[in-house]
Image: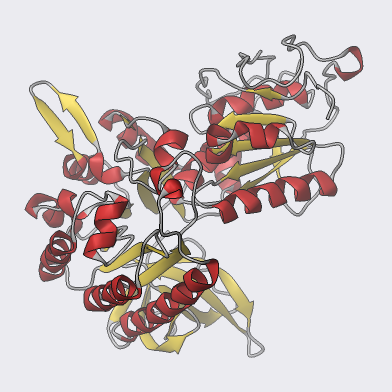
């Protein structure tokens, strides 16, 4: 592939986005280690940015975790506030952004597929790869002719500045009504990143390299973002991060922990539902459980077990054992009986025997998770597990994954069955389908992360509204409910 000065990797400081935005040329800083071609960042004469006569269109595809979703929202908001128009990834766009994931080799492959799909959709478009994959293996993406711009996890917000220049959205002065932006938002929950990075260095995990050392967002900034989300019409906020449970912020002679921040958000904002993710068993104490039991907290936690085998956990260098995990879950359920606990599980970790796998399955059944995310082990470059002996054959990994997913279906079904009968409070998201009898079937989530399907009259708009319903029967991946018993005011 010929050297191309347009192909750059961004390394700059993200700028704040003002309420009334004026577009301008912002020159990126170039990381000489990642640029393929000359170091001159000036476009070629034929490529000098020209002001567009229409507002450019952009599309974003996000792969992976809730933290990626939070980053995606920041990028989308920055581009919209700069005057660009957001379209679906399947539509024609001037800019395609793929927010990549690199947690497994399959995630890498999916990221490459989406980048190629974007190029096929519009060969003249600017295609940007951002997120964890370029942070870990930029050389892979540098070799892809479909990719014009690369930015890692730490630098992904600066991609907004570069895009404005590259698509020629320059020398135009305009004012953008922020209320218009809020009206174009269709999601019911806002992801707000309060923490990023990890220093655990589990033997299989590439994320510390992709996300860097732990950094935390100041409590006042978190509260500001939650208030902004409320102003934009969001009724649920999810506080997310690489490992949210490790959150800490020094204030005078004390250190604020996650429970302190949750309490401040509940006390100082009017958010109707607050959800938190990525908490480990050793981070769950009586104070944290007391906060989770607050009526405006979502009774749901994602606790990544990874393996139910004691010996496999040791080889993974996880920071807990099954006894600690069991105790934390028991304490949670004693105080919050309706809590939903979801988890991640890796099967086929190097050296995993049939006995270890069976022990892990038994522990998963004992805990009774509400949902499982199951992944066959995927060796990642530059991780200790990739070099371990006893690599498990792919067919065995797939067979074990299928077994564990079947267990997951059983557990999810049992969790859903327990929700039939009681009144459920659901934040409705979208219409699933139109009924032939003049009704619509909506869907949304309960606080404990159960998908509920809500029938309603055709002329009733339930989007982004809390409704109270009764669970009637199992349906698809959740529960079918009665017509709404009560609908909260908007």
Q: Residue 337: give x, y in percent of width and height.
A: 17, 73
Going 62% across and 28% down the picture, which residue do you hit? 160
Left or right of 184? Residue 41 is: right
Q: Which residue occupies the foreground of this view, 7 or 180?
A: 7
Q: Position of residue 200 (x, y in %)?
A: 29, 40
- Depth check, front residue: 82 or 151: 151
Vertical comparison of 6 with 256: above or below: above
Occupied quadrant, residue 133: top right
Q: Is residue 251 visible?
A: yes
Spot occupied by residue 144 in the image (x, y as percentages of width and height): 75, 37
Q: How many marks?
A: 0
Quadrant of the frame with the N terminus: top right
Colour mode? Answer: secondary structure
Residue 363 x, y percent position in the rendering: 24, 73
Q: Residue furthest front?
A: 389
Residue at 32 percent across and 84 percent down: it is 414
Q: Is residue 231 left or right of residue 3?
A: left
Does residue 381 appear to the left or right of 122 in the view shown? Answer: left
In the image, farthest residue toward the right: 46
Q: Quadrant of residue 20?
A: top right
Q: Residue at x 63, y 14 (%)?
A: 32
Q: Quadrant of the C terminus?
A: bottom left
In the displayed structure, does residue 129 sit left or right of residue 16?
right
Q: Is residue 298 visible?
A: no
Above or below: residue 318 compared with residue 53: below
Q: Is residue 43 above or below residue 358?
A: above
Of residues 407 and 67, the one drawn nearer to the viewer in this rendering:
407
């Amino acid at each position: 592939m010929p050297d191309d000065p347009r192909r750059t990797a961004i390394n700059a400081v993200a700028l704040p986005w003002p309420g009334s935005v004026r577009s301008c040329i912002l020159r990126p800083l170039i990381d000489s280690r990642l640029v393929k071609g000359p170091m001159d960042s000036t476009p070629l004469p034929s490529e000098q940015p020209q002001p567009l006569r229409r507002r450019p269109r952009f599309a974003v595809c996000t792969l992976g975790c809730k933290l990626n979703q939070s980053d995606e929202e920041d990028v989308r908001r920055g581009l919209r506030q700069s005057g660009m128009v957001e379209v679906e990834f399947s539509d024609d766009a001037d800019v395609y952004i793929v927010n990549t994931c690199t947690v497994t080799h399959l995630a890498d492959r999916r990221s490459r597929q989406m980048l190629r799909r974007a190029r096929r959709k519009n060969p003249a478009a600017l295609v940007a790869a951002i997120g964890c994959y370029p942070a870990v293996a930029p050389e892979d993406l540098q070799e892809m002719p479909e990719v014009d711009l690369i930015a890692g996890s730490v630098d992904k917000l600066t991609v907004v500045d570069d895009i404005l220049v590259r698509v020629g959205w320059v020398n135009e002065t305009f004012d953008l009504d922020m209320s218009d932006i809020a009206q174009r938002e269709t999601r019911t929950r806002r992801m707000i990143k309060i923490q990023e990075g990890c220093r655990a260095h589990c033997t299989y995990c590439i994320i510390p390299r992709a996300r860097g050392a732990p950094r935390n967002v100041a409590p006042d900034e978190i509260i500001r973002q939650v208030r902004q989300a409320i102003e934009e019409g969001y009724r649920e906020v999810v506080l997310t991060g690489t490992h949210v449970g490790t959150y800490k912020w020094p204030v005078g002679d004390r250190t604020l922990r996650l429970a302190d921040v949750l309490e401040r958000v509940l006390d100082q904002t009017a958010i109707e539902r607050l959800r938190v993710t990525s908490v480990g068993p050793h981070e769950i104490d009586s104070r944290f459980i007391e906060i989770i039991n607050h009526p405006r907290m979502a009774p749901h936690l994602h606790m990544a077990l990874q393996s139910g085998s004691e010996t496999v956990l040791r080889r993974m260098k996880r920071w807990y054992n099954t006894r600690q995990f069991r105790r934390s879950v028991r304490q949670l359920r004693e105080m919050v009986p309706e809590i939903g606990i979801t988890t991640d599980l890796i099967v086929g970790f190097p050296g995993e025997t049939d006995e270890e796998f069976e022990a892990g399955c038994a522990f998963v059944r004992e805990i009774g998770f509400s949902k499982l995310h199951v992944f066959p082990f995927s060796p990642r470059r530059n991780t200790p597990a990739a070099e371990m002996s006893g690599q498990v054959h792919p067919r065995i990994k797939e067979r074990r994954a299928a077994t564990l997913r079947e267990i997951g279906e059983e557990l999810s079904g049992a969790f859903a069955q327990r929700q039939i009968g009681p009144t459920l409070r659901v934040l409705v998201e979208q219409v699933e389908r139109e009924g032939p009898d003049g009704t619509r079937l909506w869907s949304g989530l309960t606080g404990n992360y159960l998908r509920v399907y809500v029938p309603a009259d055709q002329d009733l708009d339930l989007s982004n509204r809390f409704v109270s319903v009764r669970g009637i029967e199992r349906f698809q991946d959740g529960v079918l409910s009665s017509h709404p018993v009560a609908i909260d005011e908007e």
